[in-house]
Amino acid sequence: MSLVLYPPARPQSIGEVIDTAFRIFKATLLRCLPYSVLATVAGQIQNIYLIVTGRTLPAFANTDPAWWVLYLLGAFIGATFVNTILIRQGAVASGSRSVGSAALVDGLRNTPAAIVMSLLIVLMVGVCFVPVLAIPRPYRALSFFALGIPALYVGVQFLCSWPALLIGRKGIIGSLRYSASLIRGNWWRTVMIYTVALTMIIVLSVTAGMIVGVLAAFGAARDLAVTTAISAVMVVASGAVYMPFITAMTLSLYGDLQARREGIDLERRIADAPAS
């Protein structure tokens, strides 16, 4: 890949950010596809265990210790592979050599920090809903919706903390602070970019669901096992494609916000410099 896509040479428009994300996605899909497939499968280890043992898929409130152990193990393995995807995309997009084994080792080494950082983000977003406990029960639903607005604002502030940790090597707290500083002043821009990305994923998911329905109707309408197998394959296939796309979008947005911040910092340095 001769053209350097990360970091961009200048701040980009929303359309250019999305276009850069697609170019990173296309340039890295084949290299990242094995990791995204494995990450998707890892997220289903606990359910595979239930299917193999002949049990029904329960709700999240499961009391089986083995299910929880496999759930946590799958989350750790999945996070490692997702880290690997972003690291490989960053290397390819910046024109560096991308060695799969080195990216995997790097992703594994950063998984504990990524998990701790994710828990901190969940905690900070969850704090926004604490006032619900002091509100009378009949009004909690409405207040929960109202408190979702500041929770959304807080959550968006840390969307760039993940690439800051893996690409910028800024540590857990440093990544959270750096992400907030990047998105400050670009909150609506960030929301619009991710809204476009999620809209694309929803459209593709609906299309995939329609394909599964057609296949089930014509080839396996009366065979539950075949229908289940087709659905499982489609889930893995769609997840394997969505994951590199989301990471590419995150990397593209991260680079654009970095370029914008560097431009602002440069303007400040020029303004603060004494006149010659």
Image: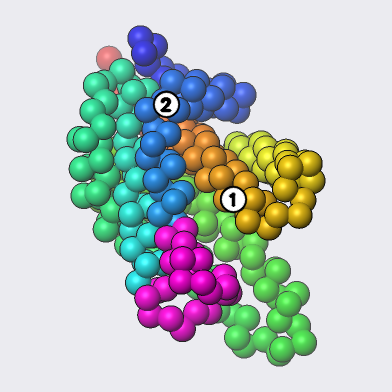
Of marks 1 and 2, the one in the foreground: 1
* C-alpha separation, residue under disc 1 versus residue under disc 2: 24 Å
- Residue at position x 64%, y 69% in the image: 147
Seen in the picture, residue 264 relative to 217 is either above or below; the reply is: above
Seen in the picture, residue 11 relative to 243 is either above or below; the reply is: above
Between 271 and 176, the residue placed more toward the observer is 176
The dot on residue 30 is 2
In reply to whether residue 186 is colored magenta, the answer given is no
Direction from residue 241 to residue 167 in the image, left or right: left
Q: Earlier in the sequence, mark 1 or mark 2?
A: 2
Where does the magenta region start and end?
Answer: 44-68
* Kind of element beneath mark 2: helix
User: Residue 92, image x and y in percent?
Assistant: 34, 23
Q: Of the residues shown, which amino acid type is indicated by label 2?
A: Leu
- Residue at position x 64%, y 65% in the image: 148
User: Residue 255, image x and y in percent?
Assistant: 42, 30
Between 120 and 58, the residue placed more toward the observer is 58
Q: Of the residues shown, which amino acid type is indicated by label 1?
A: Ala
Between 240 and 173, the residue placed more toward the observer is 240
Residue that carries the numbered disc 1 in the rendered image:
229
- Residue at position x 38%, y 80% in the image: 65
Image quadrant containing the N terminus: top left
Query: In which quadrant of the rendered view does residue 261 lie?
Result: top left
